[in-house]
Amino acid sequence: MADRTQRNELRATLRERFPRERSQLLPALQYIQDEHGYLPGWAMEVAGWHLGIPSSEVYGAATSYTELSTSEPASHVIKICTGLGCRANGSLELLERTKQELDSADDGNVAVEEVPCGYMCAVAPVAKWDHDWIGRATIDDLKAIAREATSI
Amino acid sequence: MTSHAQRALDSLKASATQRAAAHSDMTRIVVQVGHCSAAVGADQVAKALASQVPDSSYIVTTGCDGACYDAPRVVVTSPDGARSTFSGVKTEHVGRILGSSGLPTQYESADPYVGQHRIVLDGCGEIDPTSLDEYLLAGGYSGLASALAKPQEKVIDEVKASGLRGRGGAYFPAGMKWESARKFPSPDRYLVVNCEEGEPGIFKDRHLMEGMPHRIIEGALIAAYAAGVHSIYIYINAEADLSTERMKQAVDQAARAGIIGEDVLGSGYNVSVTLRRGAGGYVCGEETTLLNTMEGDRREPRLRPPFPTEAGLFGRPTVINNAETLASVPVIMAHGAAAFAETGSEKATGTKVISLSGALERPGVVEVPMGTTLREIVFGLGGGIIGGKAIAGVAVGGPSSGILPDSMLETAIAPGMLHESGVMLGAGGVIALDENVDVLEAVRSLAKYNADESCGKCTPCREGTPRMVDALDRLLSGAGSPGDLDELRGLAEVVGAASLCGLGQAAGGPINSALHFFGDELAALAKG
């Protein structure tokens, strides 16, 4: 839970950056997520105060968009695309083997997620390591990432 | 008589010509950096080139030319015009490339443009997307200047005569959309440029934003002028960071040059452009959902009517056009409706940008005339299946559409339905599946996508789409019964008939195409 100072600081920043209009809700939430990596409950509440939107509606909007997250993310994420274009290029096997690799390392610090499409189908299969996309990903690429991830 | 706009444009071009002269006796080294090619090392190549470039050369970072199979690509053009193209470039090749300027052209052997007709993509991978000058010198903004010199009705008539339809998937005539927004009485109106592109297997709007941002902006300005709009919103997908960066830069440049803002090119027309980012979700590309997103609501569609052209953004008449649609507009205004309508088929004019992927030798982004057959696209431009394997099917148009078998590849691309079972061209995704992929597993993955992305507003879609997946799972796991086929058929019909937006209405597409084309396989599974 954030203290009063943190709330006041956020409120001041929001006041500076975002006009008090409902249409600013998504830009404000995107700003908060960029700052914190996710949307803390108290920050959503502050966004609601500033924009004059009930917390329930802020939460409703926040949980409706796939790119917004209300829970703290794992320290590191490996995302592997399992869309059709990537499947046709062996992404399911990549996913399986990456999971095995991390299971054997027994590390809770790294999450492996499937994504439905990375929109880079022409360099399939694709994977994402935290913020970087890797095109034409191979088992060796992902093994190297898994090793790096578990040693952090 | 030369119009104000034309004179203003001519003077911008004159200063661009002067600035370009500084490079006229230098070797031009183009590095194609897009979000895909960066993922295979193009940004590293660009850095390495920049650090070693000799004084006799200059580096330009462009978008990609669509030959993604060969990315990263570098094109070297010497002052005498000789070109060398380097494919699959790695940082260790940089020294060799810089030493080889002036080599005879290697282009003919692997020209990726053969079989294409590039209007929308013309210049992608060639001209600098971060340079207004290069766009101007390639004839850019002459469509806008020509539009501003005409009355708004004339611009709409020209676009109507061209037969241009929306390229986002619904193929509504663009000119009619502008006209209805324009005719609806209101103190203000909006234009929203839909660059949400959240559909799996589609990456052409990103390709275009990264390669030719000014063309989209020019098209948007023409549309806004014609529809009586003074505020444009460009709505870009949450993940498309590079696209956003290049679009923002292009908007800023155009504003500084007097192409956006008060008194556009001295014509007296005022317009503002604002960029907005999406926050994820397939349904957000649906136009009424997109409006809810922009207004700060949940990602849910709205009831229609009223249509957005009557009551859209903030309740005002709103034109919503896809990026590719708008990028087709400048050429219509610059060269006339007749020139545009020469390309394509009788039923549909112009071209379509296709996102080609799957088990292909040459996946990438291509632009072909409407009426081109899927076989030409998959085997001609796409180079056929990797390793000469057999083709199992082609998923056309994404999760709202379906999968066609090999026997249907003579089908010509056209707006709307390609086959009565529900296979549509959609936004132009073509994913080829080889014999190693189980087509029914592929259908399941499309159905699962629809179930995951359903926003939950309409009960039939929220409850029906997961049940389609359940029925497919029973069949695929060997626990199927003939009743499952009936359930799939019934669900596809009910969800399609009782949903508000396109996601639900077309959610049965993959199922229906499977029942039609792969019915025997499904029936075999249903016997257990």
Image: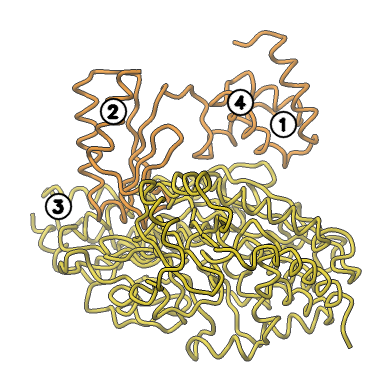
Mark seen at residue A53:
1
Q: Which residue is mark 2?
A: A146
Q: Which residue is more in the foreground, B189 or B2?
A: B2
Q: Are marks 1 and 3 in contact (CB under 8 Å)?
A: no
Q: Position of residue A94 (x, y in %)?
A: 23, 41
Does B368 sit left or right of B476 as displayed? Answer: right
* Alpha carbons under labels 3 and 4: distance apart: 49 Å
Same chain check for tags 1 and 3: no
Badge nearest the viewer, 3 or 2: 2
Could you give the CA–CA distance between mark 2 and mark 1, rounded to whole angstroms? 42 Å
Instruction: Report in which chain the residue with disc 4 lies.
Output: A
Give the chain letter for orange. Answer: A
- Amino acid type indicated by mark 3: Gly
The total of numbered circles placed on residues is 4
Whole-percent x, y for residue A31 in the image: 64, 32
Q: Could you tell which of marks 1 and 4 lies nearer the N-terminus?
A: 4
Judge the density around disc 1: few (<14), some (14-19), many (≥20) Cα neighbours within 10 Å.
some
The picture places residue B435, in percent across and down from the top left corner, at 15, 63
Q: Residues within 10 Å of mark 3 (few under 14, many from 20)?
A: many
The colour assigned to chain B within the rendered structure: yellow
Name the mark on residue A35: 4
Front disc: 1 or 4: 4
Q: CA distance from mark 1 to mark 4?
A: 21 Å
Q: Disc 1 sits on a residue from what chain?
A: A
Q: Is residue A70 above or below residue B107?
A: above
Amino acid at circle 4: Glu
Q: What's under tag 2, amino acid-wise?
A: Ala
Q: Chain of mark 3?
A: B
Q: Earlier in the sequence, mark 4 or mark 2?
A: 4
Circle 3 is placed at which residue position? Answer: B480
